[in-house]
Amino acid sequence: MHERPLGNPDAPPAKPERVVHSMRALGKNDPPSTITVAGKIYRHEITLKHDFWAATAFYLGESGERVVLKIGRVVEFAGLPLIVIGKWLCWREVHFYQRLSDLPNVPKVLGRVGPTGFVHEYVAGKPLSSDRTIPDDFFDRLLELIDLLRQRGIAYVDTNKPQNILLGDDGLPHLIDFQISWDSEWWINKPLSRWITKKLSAEDGYHVLKHKKRLRPDRLTPAESEKTERRSWLIRLHRLVSKPYFLFRRRLFKRLRSTGRLMPEGSK
């Protein structure tokens, strides 16, 4: 039986705090206070997110320039050395940023930090939301960007998350977080990989139109509105698989909070 803190018999056991920290990519640690990239020193400004697979934070350089650090998982979970997956996820995401480095809509990678981390440029802007005025041509430009990626054999795959689509101060769409993106070049069967890329890109387009319907319904054409009502088998499969996972996740976090074992700040 675990010891309970003195003075409060109803308090949760002290040891299970390890379970809470195991839900974070860096465990009990936080992103480093300083990092060095290409000979420049950057200091930690704020941690944006620290979940199971990665921690993301803003850093400031000596002259005030901001960069973004993303560190993949380094701690084990249930005895499994997940740093191996953290390294792989870091490698594949850097791959996508480098493949698209000539596009103004994708931030450039500035360097690597540790075995699972990398730094990319900061995009001046905000994630998609109803709090900002969205330019009339924003979603058209975003669809053009998705199609440009498809022509290069890449599907972004994650447009369902509005926080991954940034409305830049320049009025243009910018994409970040390529953790689950798809590259047809990795597959020997080229016809099949191109077919998969086309299907995944179509799903990206579907989610873009769903965002447009919610945020700029005045710019949605009848044909686009009709497309938002068509749920492909991929969408149905995704929801079938993800719904039980998020239900379990929600109940787990609720249990942790109800027992007093709150997730550390910045965790989700």
Image (tube, rainbow, N blue to C red):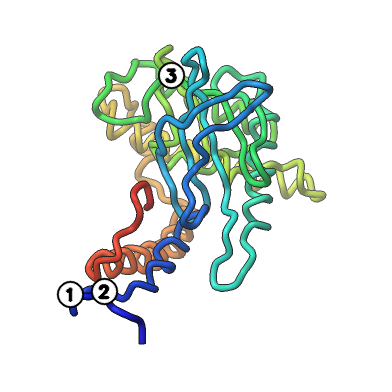
Nearer to me, 137 or 59: 59
Which three-letter amino acid code belongs to the residue tagged 3?
A: Ala
* Secondary element at image label 2: loop
* Number of marks in picture: 3
| Mark 2 and mark 1: Cα distance apart in space | 6 Å
Q: Is residue 187 left or right of residue 120?
A: right
Please give the name of the residue rendered at 40% of the width and 21% of the height, measured from the top-left corner.
Answer: 125
Q: Is residue 45 above or below residue 56?
A: above
Q: Is residue 168 left or right of residue 155?
A: left
**Res 106 → quadrant:** top right
Question: Percent x, y for residue 24?
Answer: 46, 56
Dot 1 and dot 3 residues touching (CB under 8 Å) = no
Q: Is residue 29 above or below residue 100?
A: below
* Secondary element at image label 1: loop
Give the mark nearest the N terminus, 2 or 3: 2
Please give the name of the residue rendered at 35% of the width and 54% of the height, measured from the top-left corner.
Answer: 264
Q: Label 1: few (<14), some or many (≥20) within 10 Å?
A: few
Please give the name of the residue rendered at 30% of the width and 67% of the height, measured from the top-left corner.
Answer: 256
| Mark 2 and mark 3: Cα distance apart in space | 46 Å
Q: Which residue is mark 2?
A: 5
Q: Which residue is mark 3?
A: 124
Q: Is residue 66 above or below residue 19?
A: above
Can the viewer see residue 12 in this picture? yes
Q: Which mark is residue 122?
A: none
**Res 164 → quadrant:** top left
Dot 2 and dot 1 residues touching (CB under 8 Å) = yes
| Mark 1 and mark 3: Cα distance apart in space | 48 Å
Q: Is residue 80 above or below residue 171?
A: below
Which three-letter amino acid code belongs to the residue tagged 1?
A: Asn
Nearer to me, 268 or 193: 268
Q: Which residue is mark 1?
A: 8
